[in-house]
Amino acid sequence: MVQSGVVCRCCDTCSFHNFNCALHIPETGNLYVNNDIFILFFTSLISLIFFSWNRKLEEEVHKKTEQLENSNQRLQKLNRVKNEFLSMVSHELKTPLTAMRTSSEFLREEDCDKETQEEMLDLIIRNIDRQSRMVDDLLDISRIESGRMVFKKEKINLKETIDNAIQMMEPMATKHGIAIEREVDNNPQVKADKDKLLRVFVNLLNNAIKFTADKGKNIKIKTEDTRDFVEISVIDRGIGIPENEQEKIFEKFYQVDSTSRRKVGGSGLGLAIIKGIIEGQGGSIRVKSEPGVGSIFTFTLRKWEE
Ligand SMILES: Nc1ncnc2c1ncn2[C@@H]1O[C@H](COP(=O)(O)OP(=O)(O)OP(=O)(O)O)[C@@H](O)[C@H]1O
Ligand SMILES: [Mg+2]
């Protein structure tokens, strides 16, 4: 409390003379507010403001640095993927070209007999097919990634489509000493794009055959009805996939073993395309696998509603 009759030391005109004014120092009386304390308080306040402002700035800089580091790592990963892609695509396109060139040179030889001619022409046609499949895959993956893949909504008899796919893959399976069985529940009708669904089956069967080393280890396609969907599984007893790789195999160009030790062909696009086709039609795909035991690829398709 300020006593009456107190005079302000710093100004004559102040109207707060006799009040508890923090800006004025009475010469007498009980209350004594020192200029130094006020300056100390004021500078502390300013320092505190600056300090917290500085902390905020530091935090902001730290956050931005982290974001930059993350973007940098992402860019480095993208660059690595791009380089792997270029080397894989060049290899996949070059290999059939080399085979076609060698076969063509054989055909030019004057003493090339009829049988060799047929053989060489077959080889050329097979390699043209391989190359055009690769280009189709690349076009498809680019359509999927840019959301440009168009899906027809057809009423499909699943049993028929599975039979078509088995028919297409039977020659390859037979060559490997493997049979393809099917176990179809209730002959379900599904809503999907027929050609693309066929592609899904062919790609999954191709993998199942390719990654089953032993003869006699048959493959099975099994369907199961759920409420709105049909679940379809392609089951093999092949080499299996380690658990830590099971998510990655759906990424484009990812292969569990992409080294030169690998005996089977492929560009690592098959599963990425399958995933794009299934998800693009409102379904999902998952894998359950154990190395040395086999793999089960299960995907869902929406049922046809009248
Ligand atoms: N049924 C399977 N059993 C074991 N491994 C598999 C199986 N299916 C896929 N994989 C693994 O997942 C990888 C990716 O499969 P994906 O079908 O995408 O590529 P790919 O078969 O190598 O080549 P592409 O399908 O383009 O010809 C394969 O290289 C293989 O390592
Ligand atoms: Mg494949």
Image (cartoon, rainbow, N blue to C red):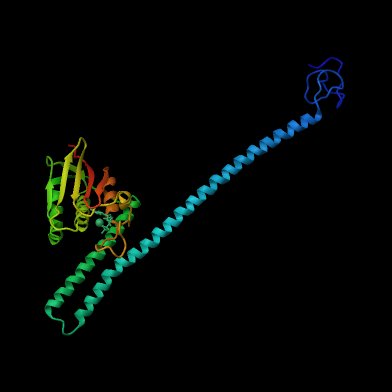
The image shows residue 158, relative to residue 112, as above or below, that is above
Q: Quadrant of the N terminus?
A: top right
Determine if residue 148 is in view: no
Determine if residue 290 is in view: yes
Marks counted in the figure total 0
Q: Position of residue 25 (x, y in %)?
A: 83, 24
Q: Nearer the viewer, residue 72 or 196?
A: 72
**In the visual, does 113 lie left or right of 74?**
left
**In the visual, does 221 lie left or right of 287?**
left
The image quadrant where one finds ligand 2 is bottom left
**In the visual, does 256 lie left or right of 190?**
right
Q: Position of residue 231 (x, y in %)?
A: 20, 42
Residue 120's image quarter?
A: bottom left
The image shows residue 17, relative to residue 254, as above or below, that is above
Residue farthest bottom in this picture: 110
The image shows residue 146, relative to residue 15, as above or below, that is below
